[in-house]
Image: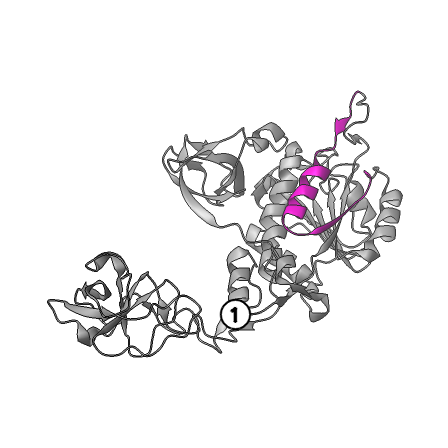
Amino acid sequence: MTAATEGRTMHSPPHQHGQVPREDSGHGSTQDHGRHDGGTHQAVHAARSVAAHRAAVRELLAPLRSTDRTETLPLRAALGKGLAQDITATVSLPPFANSQMDGFAVNTADLPDAGAELRAVAAVPAGAVPARLEPGTAAPIMTGAMIPAGADAVVPVERAVPDRFPLADDGSRENKVWLPATAAGTFVRRIGSDVQVGELALAAGAFLGPAQLGLLAALGIPEVTVYRPVTVLLVTTGDEVVEPGQPLEQGRIYDANGTLLESAMRQAGLTVVRTAISTDKPKELRALLRAEGPAVDLIVTTGGVSKGAYEVVRQAMEGQQAEFLHVAMQPGGPQGIGTFDAVPFLGFPGNPVSCLVSFEMFLRPVLAELFGSPAPRMPVRARIAGGLSSPEHKHQVRRGSLRADGTVRLEGGESSHLMHALAGSNALVHVPQGVSALAEGDEVEVWML
């Protein structure tokens, strides 16, 4: 977002993109009610691309990536966080050469092509420091145990004759073992073969899952510096919206957006401050934002961002450094972005699927990129079960179920109110801008939910 566009309402040319669909328009009507920019000149612009809007969201939130927003936590408390600093290996892994198998530590010079019978010496358990291996001997060794000096390979016990560890250590026949020829380095984990001391172990921005925390523990690191979770003020708007559990009068609907978005945000590691449903009175919404906004990092609203006559979020943002525009995406085209009293602000559409798609397309990936948490959605390729059509000038996001055979079945239609179809889905199906139709069996990109 540039200085030239801040504080301005943005609209797509009607002849190019048509009327904003009602399913994306939030809680108001689709009628264009003119200015919402506090008197600044209203320009007409083409719809912004998905990539450009995601970049604008990143620019808005980038200042939150600062050293004063970090904390140091013990490893057990850091699961799901994003690493704030590079981690250099303080020891090599493994810290000493060790056995990859239960077997016999040998010097391969003692084993000619035909193999040889060697004398078994004292066993080497894990955690012990073994004596040097003498020529003509083999040391029974356990998995993970230190390779004795003088040994350069391990022969698995099942390849020995007899294929068991000797019971005696007195020079008797029971103490002898035949072993086949073996190449140097066989079944030996070299010191530092995983990571060398001084090497970069984890880069800042890494998502700390079980594997990453296990690596830090293996390096002997007891605590780690991570980014503090972003705190979001989540505001649902609309006179017609009722909290679940309350009586449902005619013309009213239950609020799905609050629960849907709060759950998605908490699952992504955000701290969510949830307010009561805001009315369609701009003055009341402004008062709510001024009361709650100073304590949070980001304000997210749902509804009231389109071109109808009662778009409360747009009206409440008059005089603020915020813009309202159309992104070339279906669902979720109408978007708001900017600041409210210097607090970063994102305005999502009011229909449930639209607001979730907005979160998944813009906020979640930006948080992953900036802070390492949540883990990014990894794209996978699937074959579509049944064809589809898509508006060529938009990036369409459909709900689907990825199946074990590598196909994805669409759930429900294009409309953004279809919560039942969303609940029956496990993936988002992406149809990029410029594609107007796909046939059965065509490949698509899907993001697992």
* Number of residues whose C-alpha sits closer than 10 Å to that of mark 1, classed few (under 14), some (14–19) or many (20 or more): many
Examine the image and state in which quarter residue 264 appears: top right
Q: Can residue 327 be seen in this view?
A: no
Tell me where the magenta segment starts and ends, as one range.
250-277
Under circle 1, the secondary element is loop
Examine the image and state in which quarter residue 321 appears: bottom right
Residue 34 rendering spot, x and y as whole percentages: 76, 43
Q: Circle 1 sits on which residue?
A: 219
At x 65%, y 52%, the residue is 269
At x 26%, y 79%, the residue is 134
At x 51%, y 39%, the residue is 427
Please state the total of marks drawn on the protein image: 1
Q: How does the figure colour the protein chain or chains?
A: one colour
Residue 234 rendering spot, x and y as whole percentages: 75, 46
Query: Which residue, as the protein is rendered here, is positioned at the far top?
Result: 250
440 sits to left or right of 90: left
Q: Reply above or below: 128 against 311.
A: below
